[in-house]
Image (tube, rainbow, N blue to C red):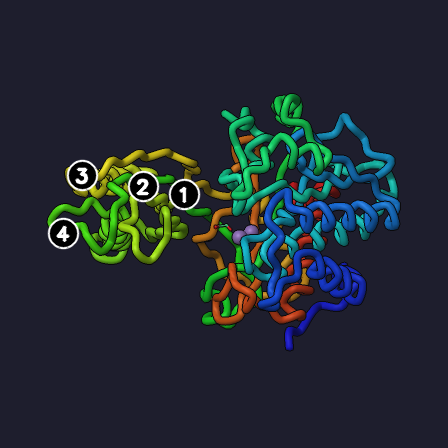
Amino acid sequence: MLKLNQTASMIDRRRFLSHLAELARFGADELGGVSRTGFSEADHAARRYLCERSRMLRLRATVDAAGNLFIGRREADRDRPVLLFGSHLDSVVHGGRLDGAYGVVAALETLARLDERDGSFAYEPVAVAFANEEGAEFGYPFFGSKAMVGPIEHAERLVDSAGLPLRDALRAAGGDIDALSSAVWPAGRLGGFLELHIEQGPVLQRAGVPLGLVEAITGRHIFEITLTGEQNHAGTTPMDDRHDALVAGARLTLAIEDIARVRRLCAVSTVGRFDVRPNVTNVIPGAVTLTVEIRDGSLDRLANAERAVLAAVAALGPGIDARVDVRMRAAPVRTDHRLSAAITDAAAEHGLPVLTMHSGAGHDAQIVAAAGPVGMIFVPSRDGISHSPREHTEPEHLLAGADVLLTTVRRLLEGADR
Ligand code: GLV
Ligand code: MN
Ligand code: MN
């Protein structure tokens, strides 16, 4: 059991946990997890639910052109810089109920606990649910936060795996692809962004520490690679005459794994998606499309690992054509000292120990960092498991993290950190 300082401000325990449980119904899947990909029906329903909850709490919900959902006070002061806090509501396929949603519910509950007694807040507090952070569909991770900091290129070309254009999906979410530039925040509007998230790794549980203070977030490059060989008959084509795209893709997959595991050129390297065409037993595969992700905390190492990916593609040899599309390059970022100090002070106020650590997962915070200072708080993930229905965090840790978010926000609004 965590020993909490009972005099520090706390969120409403029962309401917070029931709110989180209710949200998990949207996209609940047969594996006991959540499949709520960005801009899906389940995602729309979860967002509508959040809007309803906001209205019940006498807060105002608005959606920008990129589908980002902002929740603010009715009496918001638009001249003040914004202190933004939140995360995302979308999930991967067969993900857990906490990745993203935890930070959004905590943000809403934080906002509901703030009351400006003397009109002296240093910032305007606003909660956010960023659109399509995972990019599990439409192939564009961090869509909403990217739209907040700059132009989105070729948005009109994005479609989901069923062929639905982003244009239509975005409209259904209350956004507008033709007005995406209106989602970009002007310089100076963002006073700071705080993201509370489950760790998604084993560090905090192993250390037996209830809170993580993130000092840096990993960089991440994503490529979509299509290899084209020659589709032919699996019974009649001699082995020496084949141009099998699946075999080439399998070789490439092993080479990609080696880039991190054996050659140590970056922290991790993953082939996460692998589509085979035509995917039929008695046909030599004519084409495959796979995704490659490399992650590291150093830009130079990422650039070097990227060269190794391209060299591995080139080494596949004749008979296989390769097309490499860069899907995303997100640079590693460091969090802000002042926001981190506010988080540390808030944790101390609650009597909670904190471990300073890196994030190997990507987060909207690393994108928002282009527009202003960011800070991140982690809570432990059981057995370090995430992006899985088995994702779990003990309620006492969820509550402790939400309390620290609330206290950090209070301290920043009241200028207690200055
Ligand atoms: C975000 O979920 C990531 O893939 O790190
Ligand atoms: Mn995730
Ligand atoms: Mn997340």
Please say if the residues under marks 2 and 1 sit with CB atoms less than 8 Å apart.
yes
Can you identify the residue that label 1 sits on? 219
Residue closest to the eye, 409 or 59: 59
For the residues labelled 4 and 2, the Cα–Cα distance comes to: 40 Å
Please say if the residues under marks 4 and 3 sit with CB atoms less than 8 Å apart.
no
As drawn, the label of residue 319 is: 3
Quadrant of image for the C terminus: top right
Q: Within 8 Å: ligand 1 and the Cβ of disc 1?
A: no
Q: Within 8 Å: ligand 1 and the Cβ of disc 3?
A: no
Q: Amino acid at mark 4?
A: Pro
Q: Position of residue 185 (x, y in %)?
A: 64, 26
Q: Position of residue 69 (x, y in %)?
A: 71, 39
**In the orientation shown, which residue stands out farthest toward the front?**
236
Q: Secondary structure at mark 1?
A: strand
Between marks 3 and 1 in the image, the one whose residue lies nearer the viewer: 3
**In the orientation shown, which residue stands out farthest toward the bottom?**
1
Can you identify the residue that label 2 sits on? 302
Between marks 4 and 3 in the image, the one whose residue lies nearer the viewer: 4
Q: Position of residue 414 (x, y in %)?
A: 75, 43
Above or below, 206 relative to 201:
below
For mark 2, does the 10 Å Cα neighbourhood hold few (<14), some (14 to 19), or many (20 or more) residues? many
For the residues labelled 3 and 1, the Cα–Cα distance comes to: 34 Å
Among the two numbered marks 4 and 3 on one chain, the one whose residue lies closer to the N terminus: 4
For mark 1, does the 10 Å Cα neighbourhood hold few (<14), some (14 to 19), or many (20 or more) residues? many
As drawn, the label of residue 238 is: 4
Between marks 4 and 1 in the image, the one whose residue lies nearer the viewer: 4
Please say if the residues under marks 3 and 1 sit with CB atoms less than 8 Å apart.
no
Among the two numbered marks 4 and 1 on one chain, the one whose residue lies closer to the N terminus: 1
